[in-house]
Image: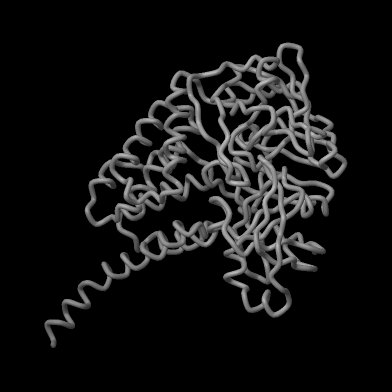
């Protein structure tokens, strides 16, 4: 018995390390990112060197510091037998994204091949096509440089709302001016086949199937623009998905979208601001803040939203007219929801049309971001997961929340969102 106690005491530090890392990795894999960030910093000193390196890869990736994240990605982490294969897959997945954001598409393609070859058993069947599509994209862009935004001064552009209530911004290429929807929820910028010809888009050999909100797959060609302008600001090396015109046409052709300026362009600007009256501002000098309520998940901005003193991770979509709650929100607040509301059919729209799923229509829901509170009179809650975001995130914050404030700042260097 005495020997057992001695051995137990000797192994306590190791057990604490393992337990701390397991908890952190669980938070990360479940996309509870803000809890992962805070708890990693609290437990960093009791982690082993490899466990700390793994968490730093994830930590700096979430905070959009790609160079720093990549610095901690070491091959000895992959050869460490004590590290689960699921974590190794996530390490490669983070490194792939790091290299994409840094413009190293060739390396991103090579690492995607490694994941598909060595970790295919850990890839969900519905996600495998995403990896295969990504491989096509990265290979087709192997010769393209890093996307960048060139600013000489503060940029101010007046946006306008289209008939669908979405903000459009003028973009210029070869003396052609087109209005594009500005959508932080778009993983890639998108353009119709017709407008791609007017916009001088270079088409690659890459062809992929793109999922829509109705789960219908549509064909898209991978293209890129060497240069175009938004005001006096030049955007270089932008990747575009070139889509059939009908995919971005709605209501029998009454409403058509020329193209979409997606999240990667917004991120490259460093900081963007939106005013309630439709003014779009990109400052030359990036601002500072004590707020740390924004992370990047793949190609999605994720914001910390507080509901009843519980910080929840929401995707953030400036192109969505209304806020939408997902199945994890229902799982956490099921008793509260089912006691007040009845299950019904909920309809919502997106690229490719509209779809209907069972859900609830909540009333007078109070959310806060950066201590700025507002009440949304009605919010739809889906009872079933949709696509990837609806599986682990609690919801998607839309324009109904944004419009409650006069001013919004999105900062992708110091990673914060603020409303005024």
Q: Residue at x 76, y 59 (%)?
A: 372
| Residue in the foreground of this view, choosing between 289 and 203 | 203
Residue 376 placed where, x, y %? 79, 62
Is 108 above or below relative to 323?
above
Residue at the extreme bottom: 1
Residue at the extreme right: 277
Residue 359 placed where, x, y %? 67, 65
Q: Residue at x 85, y 38 (%)?
A: 163
Q: Residue at x 46, y 48 (%)?
A: 126
Residue at the extreme front: 252
Question: For residue 151, what is the image quadrant?
Answer: top right
Left or right of residue 330, residue 61 in this image: left
Is 367 above or below relative to 350?
below
| Residue in the foreground of this view, choosing between 71 and 359 | 359
Question: For residue 9, what is the image quadrant?
Answer: bottom left
| Residue in the foreground of this view, choosing between 411 and 258 | 258
- How are the colours assigned in the image? one colour
Residue 165 placed where, x, y %? 82, 42
Instruction: Report how many numbered discs are placed on residues in the image.
Output: 0
Residue at the extreme top: 174
Is 418 above or below relative to 144?
below
Q: Which image quarter holds the N terminus? A: bottom left
Q: Residue at x 36, y 64 (%)?
A: 22
Residue 188 placed where, x, y %? 59, 34
């Amino acid at each position: 018995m005495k020997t057992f106690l001695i051995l137990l005491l000797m192994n306590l530090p190791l057990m604490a390390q393992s337990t701390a890392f397991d908890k952190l990795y669980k938070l990360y894999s479940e996309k509870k990112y803000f809890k992962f960030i805070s708890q990693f910093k609290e437990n960093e000193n009791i982690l082993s060197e490899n466990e700390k390196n793994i968490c730093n890869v994830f930590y700096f990736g979430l905070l959009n510091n790609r160079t720093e994240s990549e610095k901690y990605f070491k091959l000895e982490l992959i050869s460490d037998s004590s590290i689960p294969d699921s974590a190794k897959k996530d390490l490669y997945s983070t490194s792939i994204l790091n290299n994409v954001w840094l413009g190293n598409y060739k390396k991103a393609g090579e690492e995607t091949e490694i994941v598909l070859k060595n970790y295919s058993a850990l890839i969900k069947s519905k996600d495998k096509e995403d990896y295969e599509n990504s491989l096509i994209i990265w290979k087709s862009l192997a010769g393209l440089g890093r996307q960048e935004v060139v600013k000489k001064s503060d940029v101010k552009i007046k946006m306008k709302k289209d008939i669908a209530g979405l903000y459009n911004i003028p973009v210029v290429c070869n003396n052609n001016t087109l209005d594009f929807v500005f959508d932080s929820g778009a993983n890639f910028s998108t353009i119709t086949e017709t407008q791609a010809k007017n916009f001088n888009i270079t088409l690659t050999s890459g062809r992929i199937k793109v999922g829509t909100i109705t789960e219908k797959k549509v064909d898209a060609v991978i293209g890129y623009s060497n240069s175009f302008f938004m005001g006096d600001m030049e955007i270089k090396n932008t990747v575009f998905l070139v889509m059939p015109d009908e995919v971005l046409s709605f209501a029998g052709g009454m409403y058509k979208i020329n193209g979409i300026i997606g999240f990667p362009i917004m991120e490259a600007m460093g900081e963007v601001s939106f005013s309630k009256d439709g003014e779009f501002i990109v400052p030359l000098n990036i601002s500072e803040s004590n707020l740390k309520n924004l992370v990047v998940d793949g190609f999605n901005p994720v914001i910390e939203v507080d509901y009843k003193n519980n910080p929840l991770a929401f995707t953030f979509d400036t192109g969505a007219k209304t806020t939408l709650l997902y199945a994890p929100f229902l799982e956490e607040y099921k008793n509260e929801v089912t006691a007040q509301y009845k299950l019904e059919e909920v309809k919502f729209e997106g690229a490719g049309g509209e779809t209907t799923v069972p859900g609830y229509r909540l009333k007078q829901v109070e959310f806060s971001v950066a201590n700025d509170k507002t009440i949304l009179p009605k919010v739809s809650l889906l009872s079933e997961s949709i696509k990837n975001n609806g599986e682990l995130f609690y919801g998607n914050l839309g324009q109904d929340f944004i419009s409650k404030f006069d001013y919004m700042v999105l900062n992708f260097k110091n990673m914060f969102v603020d409303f005024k």
